[in-house]
């Protein structure tokens, strides 16, 4: 197949003939042919740590020429250590799994979808419509969510959790025994880096060094702060798991700004689509909500509105359950009060994982690519010490500094000085 167009990379390196034919069958009329294409990076810099993101426009001949706009997520093309890291931790395999499950849950069209439509998903690649063409856009990572954006996102998270709860109930009824997600897919939930002590040590080292550099309170902190932070990070990561005698669902575990796209009516967000399920795990729903709140809102917002947000989430979640699932959850004594208890149990995870993610996700995409996308330094920055580039960038960017400083000081205040 020959194309007469300028190319960032060859389309044939990404999609084979069979896949292109399948995409046409889903997006164009029978007999349509690709006459050219445009393929380019989705952003300047990197849009996320665990993939390469591309935008593809197919120029297709039907009666007239029409454009098909697609978003493609692939294994990194020029960073073998990162590609190995993704493969070893099952990130892409898990995302392919969840889109398979989504197809099994429900394939009806939804005017207010909480998840994207996908055309191709496997351990190497994800292809979906380019939602930016449909008017969806992300919220600036330099800001915090306001109440409107938090509530709209909480609605979609609640619908996501309820969809899996309903799916598990249907599987239970059809198989005549309690559905055991981990029995079927537990081998894919393996994420070695997450419970590797090196991960906790690297996160703790950065948090300690960041506070030492920027916090005016550092002299009041204990001398063994780094060691205590290591213990906290490891406990937070260990807490994220399935528990007996309560509701467990697939949790997203990565609800930061780029993984939530909003549609607007004027200036008001009226729908949120949740993207990027590479980090998904199996745990009580509260872990997603506590991570969402700490990643996207200020401490003062949480003090004023956290209870309202959580109650809104639970209301939408309950209304989205079918009758059989409601009976199953009643037998588990899973109600609003129980959910709120779990939220407090999940708070440590929400705070500590926010502190671990902020150095990556808040950095300007171009600087993030220079810092975290170098094959020579990728492993050391992820697993050993990333303090130097993070602190140096924080000295130049006050928003980057203040967000990390706020969550780091809050962790020490609550879990070390307050224990």
Image (cartoon, helix red, strand yellow):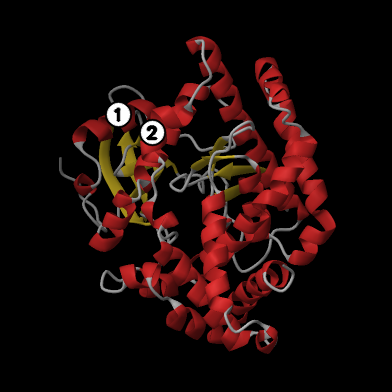
- Work out whether residue 273 can be spotted: yes
* Residue at image point 41% right, 60% down: 49
Is residue 137 positioned above or below 342 on the image?
below
> In the image, residue 404 lies at what x, y percent?
60, 73
State the mark number for residue 119.
2
> In the image, residue 341 lies at what x, y percent?
74, 44
State the mark number for residue 352.
none
Sequence-wise first label, 2 or 1? 1
Q: Quadrant of residue 408?
A: bottom right
* Residue at image point 74% right, 27% down: 319
> In the image, residue 183 lies at what x, y percent?
42, 28
Looking at the rendered image, the quarter that the N terminus falls into is top left
* Residue at image point 61% right, 69% down: 142
- Work out whether residue 78 can be spotted: no
Residue identifier under label 1: 22
Tell me the distance, in whole angstroms, between the alpha carbons under discs 2 and 1.
Answer: 8 Å
Q: Quadrant of residue 325?
A: top right
Cβ atoms under marks 2 and 1 closer than 8 Å: yes
- The kind of secondary structure element at disc 1 is helix
Residue 4 lies left or right of residue 57; in this view the side is left
* Front position in the image: 326 or 395: 326
Looking at the rendered image, the quarter that the C terminus falls into is bottom right
- The kind of secondary structure element at disc 2 is loop
* Residue at image point 61% right, 34% down: 161
């Amino acid at each position: 197949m020959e194309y007469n167009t300028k190319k960032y990379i060859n389309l044939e390196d990404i999609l084979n003939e069979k896949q292109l034919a399948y995409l046409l069958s889903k997006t164009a009329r029978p007999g349509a042919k690709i006459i050219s294409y445009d393929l380019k990076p989705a952003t300047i810099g990197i849009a996320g740590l665990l993939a390469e993101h591309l935008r593809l426009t197919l120029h297709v001949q039907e009666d007239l020429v029409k454009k098909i706009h697609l978003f493609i997520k692939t294994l990194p093309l020029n960073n073998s250590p990162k590609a190995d890291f993704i493969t070893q931790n099952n990130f892409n395999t898990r995302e392919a799994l969840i889109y398979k499950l989504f197809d099994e849950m429900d394939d009806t069209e939804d005017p207010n979808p909480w998840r994207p439509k996908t055309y191709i998903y496997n351990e190497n690649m994800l292809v979906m419509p380019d939602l930016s063409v449909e008017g969806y856009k992300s919220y600036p990572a330099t800001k915090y969510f306001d109440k409107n954006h938090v509530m709209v996102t909480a609605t979609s998270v609640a619908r996501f959790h309820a969809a899996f709860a309903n799916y598990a109930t249907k599987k239970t009824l059809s198989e005549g025994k309690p559905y055991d997600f981990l029995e079927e897919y537990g081998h894919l939930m393996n994420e070695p880096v997450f419970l590797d002590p090196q991960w906790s040590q690297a996160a703790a080292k950065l948090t300690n060094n960041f506070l030492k550099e920027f916090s005016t309170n550092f002299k009041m902190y204990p001398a063994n702060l780094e060691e205590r932070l290591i213990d906290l990070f490891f406990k937070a990561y260990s807490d994220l798991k399935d528990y007996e005698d309560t509701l467990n669902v697939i949790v997203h575990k990565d609800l930061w700004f780029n993984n939530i796209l909003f549609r607007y009516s004027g200036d008001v967000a009226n729908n949120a689509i949740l993207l990027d399920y590479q980090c998904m795990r199996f745990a009580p729903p509260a872990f997603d909500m506590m991570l969402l709140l700490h990643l996207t809102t200020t401490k003062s917002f949480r003090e004023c509105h956290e209870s309202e947000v959580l109650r809104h989430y639970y209301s939408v979640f309950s209304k989205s359950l079918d009758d059989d699932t409601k009976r199953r959850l009643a037998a588990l004594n899973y109600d609003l009060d129980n959910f709120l208890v779990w939220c407090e149990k999940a708070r440590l995870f929400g705070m500590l994982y926010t502190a671990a993610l902020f150095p990556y996700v808040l950095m300007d995409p171009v600087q993030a690519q220079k810092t975290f996308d170098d094959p020579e330094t990728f492993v050391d920055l992820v697993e050993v010490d990333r303090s130097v580039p993070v602190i140096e960038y924080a000295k130049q960017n006050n928003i980057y500094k203040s967000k990390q400083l706020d969550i780091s000081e809050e962790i020490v205040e609550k879990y070390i000085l307050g224990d």
